[in-house]
Amino acid sequence: MSRFWKNILWAIVTLLFIAFLFSLFAEPAKAPTTLNLNQLVDKINAGQVTQIKVNGNDLAVAMKDGSQAVAEKETESGISETLKNLNVSSTALAGVDLEVQNQTGWDYWMSLLLPTILPLLLLAAIFWFMFRSAKSGANQAFNFGRSNLRLSTFKDRVTFKDVAGLKEAKEELIEVVDFLKNPKKFLDLGARIPRGILLMGPPGTGKTLVARAVAGESNVPFFYISASEFVEMFVGVGASRTRDAFMTAKRAAPSILFIDEIDAVGRQRGAGMGGGNDEREQTLNQILVEMDGFDRDTRVIVLAATNRPDILDPALMRPGRFDRRVVLDLPDLNDRESILKIHAEGKVLDKGIDLRKVAQRTPGFSGADLANLMNEGALIAARENQKLIRQEDLFNAADKVLLGPERKSRMISQKEKEMTAYHEGGHALVAVALKDADPIQKVSIISRGYAGGFTMKLPTEDRHLKTRTQFLADLAMMMGGYASEKLIFGDVSTGASSDLKQASELARQLVTKYGMSDLGPITFGKSEDMIFLGREMTSERDYSEEVASEIDAQVHDFLMNAYETAEKILKTHKPVLKKIAEALIEKETLEQDDFYAVVKPFRIKPI
């Protein structure tokens, strides 16, 4: 309402300003002269009047000199009779044009009623706006406990054919769709469909996309809402919205209710620093009751998605509520290729493009990352005014998604360029000389993101297990840049800081997490199950100070052995290191074929 009056005030101020401007530049209009009847008679007899317009008792008089005058006649008589009674000569009156304008009934009644009705109408309009605002506020108050539940439409329909990979997840959900379409074949066997299905997986793996595919495959109403929309600052609103959401889904049963990011309200109760009677916990309690409380006779299937299943309340995960948990993993090589083909639709690709090679260079990429990769490839091609998207554009897009955009404008000295080339060459050479290291895909000294350069090594196939020797090869490669700088320049730079940090973390994991040290097959340290705001709050050290010293010693041994291995390889193949560095200084980037063409003449035998 205050906004309405502000608009009215601005309108009035604007109109007054415009009127002020017109008053400054407009010539003032000359007001007509007022005559009494005797003066009018004198001017008629003198021949100064050309026309008289009669409108009721009002007279509009036009003079020969162009001026205007007004007068008023007697009420009881007409204009001619009035003028004759005042001794106007017939000759003078004949020279005056008399025009009688009859007043209509509408004009007459408006002249009487308008002064009375107009204030009343104005008051009525004010009261109408006031009651309208009050009614809107009342509606908002009554609708405050209503859920913002949305019904899926078939405008942008997605089916399981549009979801690449996730074979097991789709099989689980196809069973749900089949139950909703043909419940009789399940009920005849005494089967009961799961009441709740939890979609779990890292961000970008397609949890929401799979839920949309369920909506596209099923012919039942599909309602969806984000869990964060349940919780408000007012106590009781979340529980009310939960009841409204389930009631809406029950009225449309059989139906599907999808709750996205359920960890917003489903975190473990009693894990916060405050009391347990907060709004989030009340909302969670209501969800628990709705899913498997006193009302069990329902045909509503609840789908929920989260990337943090570890922090969900145990009561939410028990049978009868979320009976089935569907894990959506990061796509493997074949799935990545299928996802790239889906996102390649509608894009103009070069005929010789090989999406398999792109999939090989993107291990660990989620479906969302791959979609972003294809889009970045198209943007790079458009930026360079190309008609087709080339293989190099997709490779550059993969590097951009992984490391950030190229920083070609970053000015570095020739000394820094040479040091970066030997640093990255050291990484690459150590990887070539170790048989358990992954093959090199790309080496570059062009800065990307925070990295001054990078060496990309990727496995030839997806790997779910990793051996101790493979970890040791990774450690040696991480130390290759540090060892190369010390060998060639006799000094080290800050460029190795990120490598040393990653190597230290990996070495500590080998000791404390994987049991691959001389301390034996044992792990050290455990995290408490106390969760606050979605993060681990405390961790417990379950070993003594003496064991802590031994752990530190084992970590040191891993790092020093890796450094010695890298140093030995670089000293043995120093000419190869020099050749790689020269090629990097010249070309700045070496793709896989270019890199192996440089090292192939030296016939390095991996150890």
Image: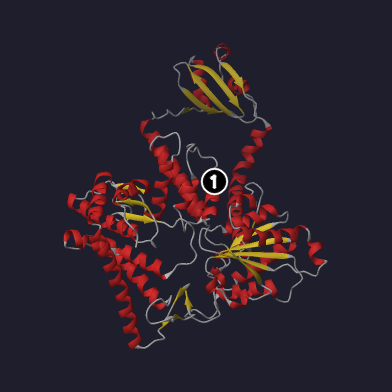
Question: How many C-alpha atoms fall within 10 Å of the one at disc 1: few (<14), some, or many (≥20)?
Answer: some
Camera-side residue of 221 and 432: 432
Name the residue: 37% across, 49% down: 592
Please state the horizontal and vertical placement of residue 26, each as a whole percent of the image.
39, 30
- Picture layout, residue 384 above or below residue 448: above
Q: Which residue is mark 1?
A: 341
Q: Quadrant of residue 436?
A: bottom left
Name the residue: 52% across, 60% down: 330
- Picture layout, residue 308 above or below residue 89: below
Relative side of 132 to 195, left or right: left
- Picture layout, residue 402 above or below residue 323: above
Relative side of 585 to 111, left or right: left
Camera-side residue of 261 and 566: 566
| Count of all numbered marks drawn on residues in the image | 1
Please state the horizontal and vertical placement of residue 181, each as a whole percent of the image.
76, 57
Camera-side residue of 216 and 423: 423
Please state the horizontal and vertical placement of residue 102, each as a whole percent of the image.
65, 26
Q: Quadrant of residue 377?
A: top left
Please state the horizontal and vertical placement of residue 356, each as a whole percent of the image.
49, 48
- Picture layout, residue 71 above or below residue 95: below
Helix, strand or loop for disc 1: helix
Name the residue: 59% across, 75% down: 282
Residue 421 shows in the view? no
Here the colouring is secondary structure
Residue furthest to the left in view is 490
Relative side of 63 to 194, left or right: left
Camera-side residue of 223 and 465: 465
Relative side of 299 to 546, left or right: right
Badge 1 amino acid: Lys
Q: Quadrant of the C terminus?
A: bottom left
